[in-house]
Amino acid sequence: MMKNIATLQTDLMGAIGSADTLDALEAVRIAALGKQGSVSALLKTMGSMSPEERQTQGPIINGLRESITSALASKKADLETADLNRRLASERVDMTLPAPETPRGTVHPVSQVMDELAEIFADMGFAVAEGPEIEDDWHNFTALNIPETHPARAMHDTFYFPDEMARDGQKMVLRTHTSPVQIRTMTSQEPPIRIIAPGRVYRSDSDATHTPMFHQIEGLVIDKGIHLGHLKWTLETFLKAYFEREDVVLRLRPSYFPFTEPSVEVDVGYSVVNGKRVIGGAEGWMEVLGSGMVHRKVIEACGLDPDVWQGFAFGTGVDRLAMLKYGMDDLRAFFDGDNRWLQHYGFNALDVPTLSGGVGA
Ligand code: PHE
C-alpha cells in the first residue's frame, strides 16, 4: 500500500509537470481527483479501515491529496501566465512607430459632390433613397412609361443580362439611370415623398465624355398640388447652393422624357473669365439637368391616384457636376485610380461639407 501511494504520487507529479496546456492539466486533475479518480479511490478506502490502520494511512492519503491539489494549482497559474504573455507578445502595438506626416488618402471628387448634394437637399427636407444597380426591366423602363417598343430604349445603350438570368419573367439590366429609384420609392412609401437618389448607372458607351459606368442623382417630390414653380424653385435653390454663387441663372427649355410631362431641360448660364467658362452670368448656356412633372402613367403604375398626387422629378450627372465646379476636363480620369490625380483633385477627409462652412470647403 505504502509503495503504491508513493508510485502514484510520482506518476501524478510527473503528469502534472509535463502537462503543457490547461486542457491537458485539467485531464490530469480529473484522473486524480475526479469522481472516478485514483486519489479519490484511495480516499474512499479509508471508510472501511480499522481505526489503527486509518491512523497510519490517513495522514499519508490526505498528504497525497494535498500535495497533488497544490501542485495542480501552481501548474495552472504557470500555464495561465504563459498564455497571457504569449497573447501580450502577439498583440503588441509599437507606440514609438512614427505616424505619417500628413494623411495620405483623399476623398474622391464624386464622393465629395455626393456628400455636398446630400447636405444641400437634406436642408430642403429630402431624404436619401437607394435602389439596386442590377435592376429589372419593369423598374428601369416599363413603369417609367418606356414600353418594350419605345424608341427611348435604344437611346439608353443598355447592358442586358442573358435571358437565363431573368427573375420572375423579368429581363435584368444594369440600371441605365437612377429613375427606377422613383418607382421603388413610390411603391414602398406613402406620399408625401421628398427624396434624392445618388448612385452608379451603366451605359454601353465610352469616349472622352462618356464612361460605361457613371454617377447620377435623382430627385423626386410627390405631394398634393405640386406644380412647375416648385420644380423651378427647388432647382434654383440647389444650383445656387451647389455652385456657391448667387448669380446662377437658369434657363428652362421644353424637352422630352417618357416619364415626365411636361419635360424640362435645364441650362445654367456661364461667363468667360480669362478664357475659361465660369458658372454665373449668362454669356453662354450649359445643359445640366433633365426634369419635369411626373407623368400620370408613372404615378398610376406605382398604384397611386394621379388626380390626388402630383410631383416633379429631376436627374443629373454627378461626375459632370463635379467637373463643372472643380474644373476637371476629362471624365475618364475619374475612374483611372491615378494617385497623382487623386492627390490633386481629392478632398481632405476631415472637411465635411456643411451649408454654414461652405459645402465645397
Ligand atoms: N433619367 C433621365 C436620364 O437619365 C433624367 C431625368 C430624370 C429626366 C428625372 C427627367 C426626370 O437622362
Image (cartoon, rainbow, N blue to C red):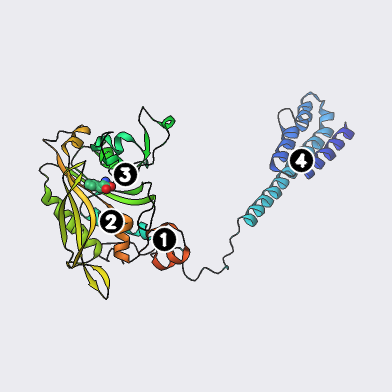
**Quadrant of the image containing the N terminus:** top right
For the residue marked with disc 3, what is the amino acid? His
Q: Is residue 46 shown to the viewer in this render?
A: yes
Q: Nearer the viewer, mark 4 or mark 1?
A: 1
Q: Is residue 9 above or below residue 316?
A: above
Relative placement, left or right, of 217 versus 124 is right
Q: Please provide percent x and percent y for residue 228.
A: 12, 49
Circle 4 sits on which residue? 68
Q: Which numbered disc, 2 or 1, marks the residue that appears first in the sequence?
A: 2
Disc 2 from disc 4: Cα separation: 73 Å
Q: Is residue 179 above or below residue 84?
A: above
In the picture, the disc for residue 117 is 2
Q: Which numbered disc, 3 or 1, marks the residue that appears first in the sequence?
A: 3
Which element carries disc 2, helix, strand or loop? helix
Disc 2 from disc 1: Cα separation: 22 Å
Question: In which quarter of the view is residue 239 placed?
Answer: bottom left
Label 1: few (<14), some (14–19) or many (≥20) C-alpha neighbours in 10 Å: few
Q: Please provide percent x and percent y for residue 23.
A: 69, 39
Q: Please provide percent x and percent y for residue 43.
A: 76, 30
Tally of numbered discs: 4
Q: Which numbered disc, 4 or 1, marks the residue that appears first in the sequence?
A: 4
Circle 3 sits on which residue? 156
Circle 1 sits on which residue? 333
Task: Evaluate if marks 3 and 4 touch, with contact meaning CB atoms under 8 Å apart.
Answer: no
The answer to whether mark 3 is within 8 Å of ligand 1 is: yes
